[in-house]
Amino acid sequence: MRPNIVTEAGVQTRFNQWWNAIPFLTSSVVVVCGIIYLICLLTGYDSFYEVCFLPSAIISRFQVYRFYTAIIFHGSLLHVLFNMMALVPMGSELERIMGSVRLLYLTFLLATTNAILHLLIASLAGYNPFYQYDHLMNECAIGFSGILFSMIVIETSLSGVTSRSVFGLFNVPAKLYPWILLVVFQLLMTNVSLLGHLCGILSGFSYSYGLFNFLMPGSSFFTTIESASWMSSFIRRPKFIMCTGGNPSNYIPTYSVQNTTSSGFSTGNAWRSLSSWLPQREASNQSSEDSRFPGRGRTLSTARDPTAPTGETDPNLHARLLEDSSSPDRLSDATITTTAEPRCQ
């Protein structure tokens, strides 16, 4: 007989399962940013000054394309890996709620508002009459982290949680979570754009409080785009999420750490987990008991005729016992044998 062998899925199988669970737009952003970084790495392209978000170049030469080219270029392998790994969970949740087309529109909206806020703050800091911070106008910023900070604020607002964990070390109030991350990244990492992350947080709060509602079209707008003929090839893809196929309540499901169905740290589940390792007594075929007579004990036996064969029982024993209980004047043909100790199963 072939033995029962428990095998674990390989690395490639697990990666495929993880990748197939990522919705269409989120996985597309990961692919685009990864390919762009690989092309820059293989070709030796490092002229990020031409594509980065540079306030002085945008104002003087009106290079608005920097609003969008800056978010898809990354300066190092660690930079692109960190941003994409942070994008996968947040982008996947938001895409399942909003749909792929709506999230794409929101991404462009956040990129635009982040850039406008960045320009305004840099201009005020660089051209104010009191004290001028010229370095903010000449700061060259690239990366997707500004959009990520906006998504963090939006996801935290939609989830309804009251506290968030910072790298699993300590919990902070949910409203302070993006600000704590802003300070932590600024202290732990070098060459980080404080203004770019700050503008991402401000855009996220502006969207959460409804300040961008007049910029968000209705569902009919996105439905019209999805019904266009040129969108058919995208919609047929299994990971594409329609705008009407997300969560209608616009609420991200949250998960409590006290999950009684799956967590092994609750009282009941902890005992079940422990008892599963203990040796179990073999169940007997006679373990079923009558609900009218709970408990365990010896079976009723009859006063046998010496000439009767061993092992033969009286089939009318139960009927006679009932008759005897209703007629106390009659003598029972049966006797009850008892013992002080219950029989072990």
Image (cartoon, grey):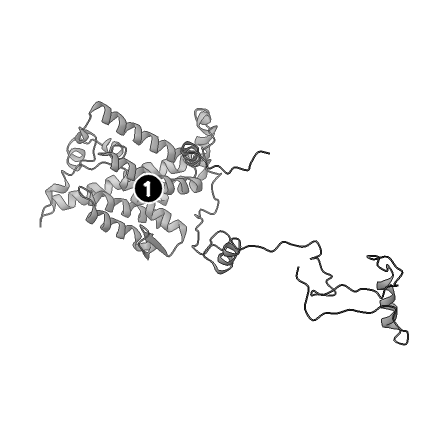
Relative placement, left or right, of 345 versus 256 is right
Helix, strand or loop at disc 1?
helix
Q: Who is closer to the viewer here, 89 or 132?
A: 89
Residue depicted at x 17% and y 31%: 49
Relative placement, left or right, of 328 versus 167 is right
Q: Who is closer to the viewer here, 340 or 76?
A: 340
In the image, is residue 123 above or below residue 258?
above
Question: Which residue appears farthest toward the top when viewing the image?
Answer: 43
Relative placement, left or right, of 66 versus 254 is left
Q: Who is closer to the viewer here, 261 or 292?
A: 292
Image quadrant occupied by the N terminus: top right
In the image, is residue 66 above or below residue 324?
above
Q: Amino acid at mark 1?
A: Ala
Q: Who is closer to the viewer here, 340 or 264?
A: 340
Q: Position of residue 263 (x, y in %)?
A: 47, 53
Image quadrant occupied by the C terminus: bottom right
Q: Which residue is mark 1?
A: 86
Which quarter of the figure has residue 280?
bottom right
Residue depicted at x 24% and y 39%: 115
Q: Position of residue 156 (x, y in %)?
A: 36, 50
Residue depicted at x 66% and y 62%: 344
Q: Is residue 9 visible?
A: yes
Q: Position of residue 177 (x, y in %)?
A: 30, 52
Question: Which residue appears farthest toward the bottom when viewing the image?
Answer: 329
Which quarter of the figure has residue 335?
bottom right
Question: Which residue appears farthest toward the front when viewing the image?
Answer: 307
Q: Position of residue 27 (x, y in %)?
A: 38, 33
In the image, is residue 134 above or below residue 272?
above
Residue depicted at x 68% and y 63%: 343
